[in-house]
Image (tube, grey):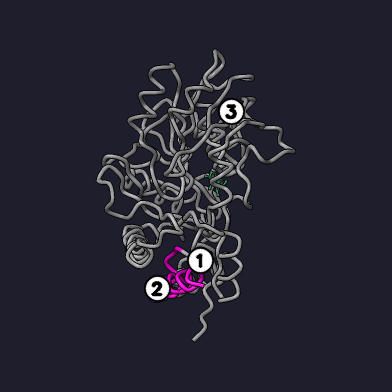
């Protein structure tokens, strides 16, 4: 029987735990607890605890968080920031809006920043490296740390997609100046709109962030610096509090689905899968996305669509150096080649193991033909 497996079913996000969400929404609304209320502080406390960091701030989105982190890193106008071209435009936009210059580099076989290639892009103006913890996988942070140390750079992680993933047992978002996370509805920990968080471990940074996300107000409510309005809505925080409780189960579920993909497609030579859940003990991957490399990618995508299966090519099919109107030109042949092959298959807690098996079966059918 033909199935319908959308890439991500937004309308199912509420239905997943409707009773609990409705209850908490009603409670918050009836209390009139909209901005900077107790649900937000509870979420911040819980998230900080989860990450083993002293402070977490709920903010409007991860893009704001990246800007704040770059400001904490002391980025000045004209400073260069090294980042992979295979990332969302928000990583570079954050650099741009803080006055910095994004310098794009290659990614490697795991689709994450290629530190060896990055070395070629260091100049006297380079101040920061931004590893992007893409697809729910943390970069080899030994390499990133050594690189940063060698060139005297600060590390600002883009961990928007990285919540819960680890390198050598350490969580994404805890390696650099600050960690930033996105709670966009399709994210692994998600809310019902835009939302984000920034986490830090240093007291000095915490005071600066307190001001930056709330119009420059200090803890007494006095305006003492220039700030943004970037507060996570209390309503969203209340929803996130519910979801954080079962977050580890959500990760396990995704890893189980990744295992099904691996077991069912692992031998197929026309596709290259992401590393399997237990492939490398240095990495704990959460599979925010399941990004494969596929021969005849466009034909495969069209075939799967015909079969009722939604897939997605990340960033609308263009890495940042191909976004001509932004002028971030770079010669990145590896990334160019990758973007002819990469494709994301359905991966979320709204689908079942049977759904994944069905997707795999259709992929096998395509390559047999
Ligand atoms: C790698 C990466 N960085 C930054 C962002 C920006 O997150 P937000 O939409 O919360 O601003 C995203 C969101 O998709 C992302 O995937």
Disc 1: CA contacts within 10 A as few (<14), some (14-19) or many (>=20): some
| Drawn side of residue 329 relative to residue 347, left or right | right
For residue 103, which numbered disc appears in the image? 3
Residue that lies at the very extreme toward the top in this rendered image: 124
Vertical relation: 23 (above or below) 96: below
Which label's residue is closer to the chain start, 3 or 2? Answer: 3
How far apart are the two marked residues, 2 and 1, measured between alpha carbons? 36 Å
Evaluate if marks 2 and 1 touch, with contact meaning CB atoms under 8 Å apart: no
How far apart are the two marked residues, 3 and 2, measured between alpha carbons? 40 Å
Residue that lies at the very extreme toward the bottom in this rendered image: 1
How far apart are the two marked residues, 1 and 3, measured between alpha carbons? 43 Å
For residue 25, which numbered disc appears in the image? 1
Decide which of 37, 256 is in the foreground and name it. 256
Residue shown at 42%/25% (left/top)?
Answer: 204
Which label's residue is closer to the chain start, 1 or 3? Answer: 1
| Drawn side of residue 187 relative to residue 226, left or right | left
Which residue is denoted by mark 2 in the rendering? 357
Evaluate if marks 3 and 2 touch, with contact meaning CB atoms under 8 Å apart: no
Q: Is residue 4 magenta?
A: no
The mark closer to the camera, 3 or 2, is 2
The mark closer to the camera, 2 or 1, is 2
Q: Secondary structure at mark 3?
A: strand
| Drawn side of residue 150 relative to residue 323, left or right | left
* Magenta-highlighted residues: 347-369
The reply to whether residue 157 is in sight is: yes
Residue shown at 55%/41% (left/top)?
Answer: 335
Vertical relation: 131 (above or below) 361: above
């Amino acid at each position: 029987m033909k199935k319908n497996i959308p890439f991500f079913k937004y309308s199912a996000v509420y239905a997943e735990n409707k009773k609990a969400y409705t209850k908490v929404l009603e409670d918050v609304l009836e209390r009139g607890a909209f901005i900077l209320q107790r649900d937000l502080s509870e979420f911040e406390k819980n998230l900080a605890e989860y990450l083993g960091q002293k402070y977490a701030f709920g903010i409007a989105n991860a893009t704001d968080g990246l800007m704040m982190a770059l400001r904490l890193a002391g980025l000045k106008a004209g400073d260069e920031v090294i980042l992979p071209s295979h990332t969302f435009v928000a990583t570079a936009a954050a650099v741009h809006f803080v006055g910095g210059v994004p310098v794009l580099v290659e990614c490697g076989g795991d689709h994450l920043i290629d530190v060896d290639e990055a070395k070629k892009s260091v100049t006297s103006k380079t101040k920061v490296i931004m590893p992007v913890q893409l697809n729910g996988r943390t970069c080899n942070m030994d390499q990133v740390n050594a690189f940063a140390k060698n060139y005297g750079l600060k590390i600002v992680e883009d961990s928007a997609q990285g919540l819960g993933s680890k390198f050598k047992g350490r969580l994404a978002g805890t390696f650099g100046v600050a960690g930033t996370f996105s709670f966009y509805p399709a994210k692994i920990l998600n809310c019902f709109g835009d939302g984000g968080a920034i986490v830090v471990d240093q007291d000095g940074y915490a005071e600066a962030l307190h001001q930056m996300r709330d119009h420059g107000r200090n803890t007494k409510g006095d305006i003492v610096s220039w700030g943004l309005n970037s507060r996570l809505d209390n309503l969203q925080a209340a929803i996130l509090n519910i979801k954080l409780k079962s977050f580890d189960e959500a990760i396990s579920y995704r890893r189980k689905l990744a295992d099904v993909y691996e077991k069912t497609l692992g031998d197929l030579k026309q596709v290259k899968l992401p590393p399997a859940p237990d492939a490398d003990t240095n990495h704990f991957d959460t599979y925010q996305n399941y990004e494969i490399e596929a021969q005849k990618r466009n034909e495969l995508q069209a075939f799967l669509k015909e079969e009722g299966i939604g897939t997605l090519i990340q960033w609308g099919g263009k890495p940042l150096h191909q976004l001509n109107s932004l002028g971030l030109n770079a010669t990145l042949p590896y990334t160019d080649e990758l973007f002819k092959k990469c494709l994301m298959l359905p991966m979320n807690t709204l689908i079942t193991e049977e759904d994944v098996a069905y997707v795999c079966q259709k992929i096998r059918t395509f390559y047999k033909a």
